[in-house]
């Protein structure tokens, strides 16, 4: 069995899917349309939805047509049995019409198609799916209302070759040790304010934030975060795992587009041995609460929760151990991919 993964190469999720597919596939190919397009074009495309319709239409026609032509040529040579697609990956309906003749199409939604603006066709193309995997039960309900079928709620856990427990050296501990760690971008709009507000609740502790330059705009409102901030470079997966192994707690805020669902960062935290403190979402509580995952239902309670687990080290370690066992048993990449392939047979 041959499989093509249309995933961003910089996402750890790509390696997780590869690991899950290995027991079932003879050949796995990964294709990232970023390899087809220069950086400046990708940056323009993230903002082009703001432009007048006539300009946006011309841009879309040129930008996406060039990507899709390369898709057809490359995937046509491979002739895979299955094509797994993360979000939309710049695909157009007529491309999927061609690819569907020889391959089964599976979408894995990392973001709500109602909130993703990088491709105007990102909702329409789901009608070509043989299966849609959603980590959010509400997204599933929304899409079913539209008449879309074969939508399955599922999660895929951590890849232990990417996120794992290690013993940092004394030098690494002296450089990177902290009680609370956050690694992530920020935004220019209300999503950015929400993230900064969330992290501000942990500012009284030994907190380190690694992020992009958009964090800087929020320090006027949340000056307590300024000294906690480090400008993030091109961090390798190994370095991110090291940072996680040098911390104890990781606040996981929910993207506003995640309505009920589970942030995949939770799995990475558990794998690297630090306890996630997770903003409430219905699916998170349903899946994890009875296994001890701390869930924040009110930002004003976040500091008390962090303080409790920092003062109760043995309990923190025991919860991580229980969560790891639970995830490995139910959401290992092999088990999750096995469930997906069973649905396609």
Image (tube, helix red, strand yellow):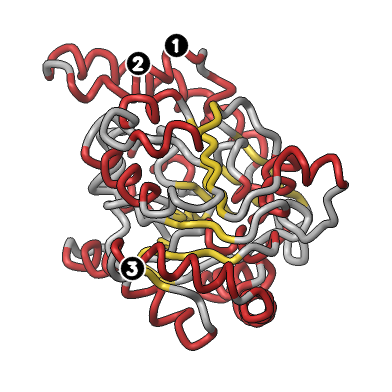
Between 199 and 339, the residue placed more toward the observer is 199
Horizontal side of 328 relative to 23 (left or right) equals left
Q: Which residue is mark 3?
A: 301
Mark closer to the observer (3, 2): 3
Horizontal side of 41 relative to 173 (left or right) equals left
Between 146 and 258, the residue placed more toward the observer is 258
Residue 244 at x, y percent in the picture: 67, 52
Horizontal side of 83 relative to 235 (left or right) equals left
Task: Tell me which residue sits at (51%, 13%) in the image.
Answer: 38
* Element type where label 3 sits in the image: helix
Quarter of image, res 145: bottom left
Q: Which mark is residue 44?
A: 2
Task: Tell me which residue sits at (78%, 61%) in the image.
Answer: 165
Residue 90 at x, y percent in the picture: 41, 32
- Image quadrant where one finds the N terminus: bottom right
Classify 85 as above or below 36.
below
Q: Which residue is mark 1?
A: 40
Classify 219 as above or below 274.
above
Q: Which mark is residue 333?
A: none
**Do we see residue 269 in this rendering?**
yes
**Do we see residue 2 in this rendering?**
no
Q: CA distance from mark 3 to mark 1?
A: 42 Å
Residue 100 at x, y percent in the picture: 46, 49
Question: Callout 3: few (<14), some (14-19), or many (20+) C-alpha neighbours within 10 Å?
Answer: few
* Element type where label 1 sits in the image: helix
Task: Tell me which residue sits at (26%, 40%) in the image.
Answer: 193
């Amino acid at each position: 069995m041959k499989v093509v993964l249309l995933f961003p190469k910089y996402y750890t999720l790509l390696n997780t899917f590869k690991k899950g597919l290995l027991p079932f596939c003879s050949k796995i190919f990964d294709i990232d349309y970023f390899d087809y397009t220069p950086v400046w074009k990708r940056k323009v495309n993230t903002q082009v939805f703001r432009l007048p319709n006539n300009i946006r239409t011309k841009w879309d026609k040129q930008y996406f047509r060039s990507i899709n032509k390369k898709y057809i040529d490359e995937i046509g040579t491979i002739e895979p049995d299955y094509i797994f697609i993360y979000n939309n990956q710049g695909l157009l309906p007529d491309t999927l019409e061609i690819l569907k003749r020889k391959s089964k199409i599976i979408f894995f939604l990392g973001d709500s198609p109602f909130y993703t603006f990088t491709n105007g066709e990102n909702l329409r193309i789901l009608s070509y799916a043989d299966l849609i995997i959603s980590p959010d039960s509400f997204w599933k309900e929304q899409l079913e209302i539209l008449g879309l079928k074969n939508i399955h709620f599922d999660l895929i856990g951590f890849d232990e070759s990417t996120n794992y427990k290690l013993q940092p050296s004394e030098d690494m501990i002296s450089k990177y040790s902290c009680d609370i760690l956050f690694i992530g971008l920020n935004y220019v709009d209300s999503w950015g304010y929400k993230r900064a507000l969330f992290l501000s609740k942990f500012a009284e502790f030994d907190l380190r934030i690694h992020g992009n330059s958009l964090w800087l705009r929020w320090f006027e409102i949340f000056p307590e975060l300024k000294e906690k901030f480090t400008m993030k470079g091109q961090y390798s997966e190994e370095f991110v795992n090291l940072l996680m192994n040098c911390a104890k707690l990781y606040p996981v805020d929910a993207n506003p587009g995640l309505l009920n669902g589970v942030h995949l960062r939770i799995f990475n935290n558990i794998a690297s041995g630090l306890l996630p403190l997770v903003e409430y979402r219905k699916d998170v509580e349903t899946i994890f609460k009875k296994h001890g995952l701390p869930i924040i239902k009110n930002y004003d309670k976040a500091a008390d929760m962090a303080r409790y687990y920092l003062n109760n080290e043995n309990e923190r370690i025991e919860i991580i151990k229980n969560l790891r066992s639970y995830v490995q048993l139910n959401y290992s990449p092999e088990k999750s991919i096995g469930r997906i392939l069973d649905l396609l047979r």
